[in-house]
Image (cartoon, helix red, strand yellow):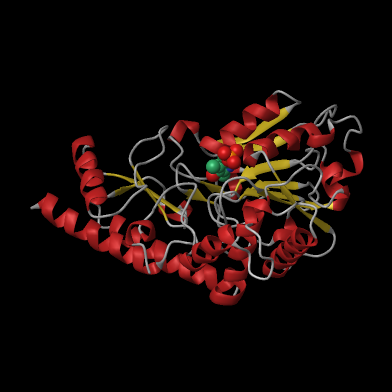
Amino acid sequence: MTNLRNSLNFSGGPGALPESVLLQVQQAILEVPGVGLSVLGISHRSDWFAAVVNELENNIRTLLGLSTDYHVLFLQGGATQQFTMVPMTLLSGRKAPAEYLQTGYWSGKALAEARRVGPIRVLWSGEDCGYDRLPADQQLNFSAEAAYLHYVSNETVEGLQFHRVLGRDDVPRVCDMSSDFLSKPCEAEKFSLIYAHAQKNIGPAGVTVVLLRDELLAEAPGNLAGFLDYQSHIKMHSNYNTPPVFAIYVVLLVTRWLLQEIGGLAQMDLLNRRKAALLYSLLDEGFYRGRAKPQDRSLMNVAFKLPTPEIEQRFLAQALAAGFSGLAGHRSTGGIRASIYNGLTLQAVEALATFMEEFQKNSSA
Ligand SMILES: *Cc1c(COP(=O)(O)O)cnc(C)c1O
């Protein structure tokens, strides 16, 4: 019962989810198997929900190989709340600056938020090159004294992705992985804090996964507002106030899909690489102009421009008529962006590549 239109959803976020998950969600809206209640009306204090949170936590630990040195939290407020809570927790009252990389739209937002709280050192900015690339290691002078290092692993808007872990082992690494979390193995234990909202790659909007090394909170201020204090959420096992039960349940279904149908993150990575390679090999032909330098291309968000704005408009209109949606670039940059998150199938990307080849032929003729 493939819904063709939905299977061709290249939206930047909220993004595509696997069809087998959507079918289970459809069922759960009416009645969760074995419970006899709608997922929208089950108490967050029920044994069922406690089991959901436990299984989800375990699935994430299994997928990432994460030890018990880490807390796994399911919070609200999106990635934005996380890049607000991080400086409140780790920078407030400190003299040593936190180091930030300014690699695109979302790291810029995080940077502005941190500046309100304490001293910041911008290690590198891509502003001058229009965010078309990421820094090489030689361009980054990490300090051993930094309070922490913050960066965004995948810049969703610009289509830039780090294909390595940055920073020093003696300075806490904090990473916004919102748009590539669980798309590949990520060496999670090299980070002190990872946050990723669900709505790009692993679920609907409403929940944000936070992985936090316990020792990171040793010097956190004791006077934070309860809701904005990681300790509150740790103590209450992500049940400090009513959590987004529905969103958490859908993320659980996605992790089951990753484990049971895909076969883990290495397999997911292989599939995502095949998807990205199809589109980037087309960009390499030159008619479609890729935004990112080849070495920094994102496997999740393929951003490009066409020779003129008129051709771009024609491309979007024809794509829409052919059933493809979500291809317009972010409002801040324009252009085209094909987001090819976990839930988007290889077949959907093949269909887009075929459409793009046809369009190119017709436009060059
Ligand atoms: C979409 C996005 C955000 C914004 O997340 P909200 O949940 O809307 O706060 C932050 N960071 C990255 C990398 C994103 O892709």
Which percent across, then down, holds residue 170?
81, 50
On the picture, is 50 further left or further right than 269? right
Question: Toward which corner of the image does residue 70 lie, by quadrant?
Answer: bottom right
Q: Is residue 24 left or right of residue 354?
A: right
Nearest the eye: 19 or 150: 19
x then y, percent, for residue 120: 71, 29
Residue 267 placement: quadrant: bottom right
Residue located 79% across and 38% down the image: 147
User: In the rendered view, would you say 91 is above or below 230?
Assistant: above
Q: Residue furthest left?
A: 365
- For ligand 1, the image quadrant comes to top right
**Residue 214 picture location, percent across and down:** 86, 52
Residue 210 can be seen in this image: yes
Could you tell me which residue is drawn at 57 percent across and 60 percent down?
30
In-front residue for pair 365/253: 253
Residue at x 49%, y 71% (from the top left corner): 270
Q: Is residue 322 above or below residue 124?
A: below
Give me the residue at 79% from left, 43% from top: 144
Residue, far top: 116
Q: Quadrant of the N terminus?
A: bottom left
Do we see residue 167 in this rendering?
A: no
